[in-house]
Image (cartoon, rainbow, N blue to C red):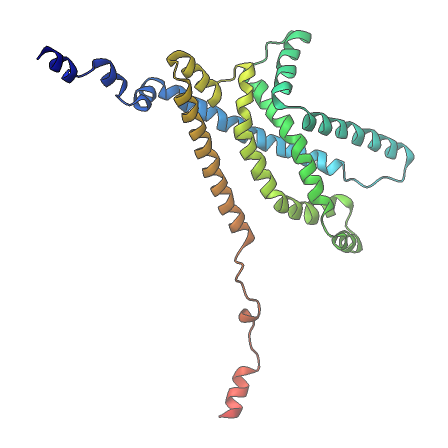
Amino acid sequence: MMATAIKEQPKAGNSAKKENWLVSTWKQYGNMILSGIGMTLLLALVGTIIGFFIGLLVGIVRTIPTPTTRGKRWALNVIKWLLSVYVEIFRGTPMMVQAAVIYYGIAQFWHLNLNRTVAALIIVSINTGAYLAEVIRGGIISTPEGQFEAASALGMSHNQRMWHIILPQAIKNCLPSITNEFIVNIKDTSVLSIISVSELFFVGTTIASQTFQFFPTYLSISVIYLVLTFTITRIFNFIERRLEGNKNYNLMANQVQVGTPKDAEANN
């Protein structure tokens, strides 16, 4: 009888654990997780926007035609060389290493206690700018040469050709790559945990170290990353389809058939 009672007795420890780990963790750490998601989206969005303008400026400068004046040609070549070095360095090194070098380097050599969020925004923006510079430069170069010639025949200067004809087409063609860079930034912000930025992965590491539930915590964090990237990808795909317009548009179907009414009257 005693043995049966012991077997049928509910296990208090297991029932407490079965309260659903996800629910109990969300109740306790929900605000931390939401703040981590917000910080991740903030860093990715602001970093991509600032990086886009950096890449736009670098891409434009690197496609400026070579001046005829010797002094201007020399100065432009030096600037292009420096921009090429910037692009190669930030495309050729991991963002984690860049974060450590910039954040701790500024603290050591300039004795500045830079805010971690500001440092993270600078790092993401500069890194993104290096990648988008090549994307935008490729978009400018891929524009048909006939459009440059037609604009020149109309008397447009290089700046007018660039702003009114070339860049609108190049940016539209580069939109999928810009979207992809935004998605990559959402995931790559996880490396900023090296400078203790409270983004999503850093929050997950903090929760795992406090609860000792490493596998379910990191699995939940990975699911959140997947939901974020999947949702944002679908949103940008919808925007791209809207910008492309209606593919079923038929020009001939919308033309007025001038001779039809008179022909009908003649036949009557």
Q: Position of residue 170 (x, y in %)?
A: 66, 45
Residue 227 position, x and y percent, is: 43, 34
Of residues 15 and 230, the one drawn nearer to the viewer in this rendering: 15
Image quadrant where residue 138 sits: top right
Question: Quarter of the image containing the N terminus?
Answer: top left
Q: Which residue is drawn at 51% across and 92% down?
A: 267
Q: Can I make out residue 143 in this image?
A: yes
For the residue pair 7 and 72, the one nearer the viewer reads as 7
Circle count: 0
Q: Can residue 199 be seen in this view?
A: no
Q: Residue at x 72, y 47 (%)?
A: 142
Residue ID at (77%, 40%): 63
Q: Farthest right residue?
A: 70
Q: Give above or below for 249 relative to 203.
A: below
Please tell me which residue lies in front, 102 or 15: 15
List the single residue furthest toward the left: 1
Residue 29 left/right relative to 174: left
The residue lying at 45 percent from left, 22 percent from top is: 36
Q: Where is residue 236 in the image (x, y as percent from the top left)?
A: 51, 42
Question: Where 181 falls versus 7 (above or below)?
Answer: below
Q: Position of residue 198 (x, y in %)?
A: 48, 18
Q: Which quarter of the picture shows residue 56?
A: top right
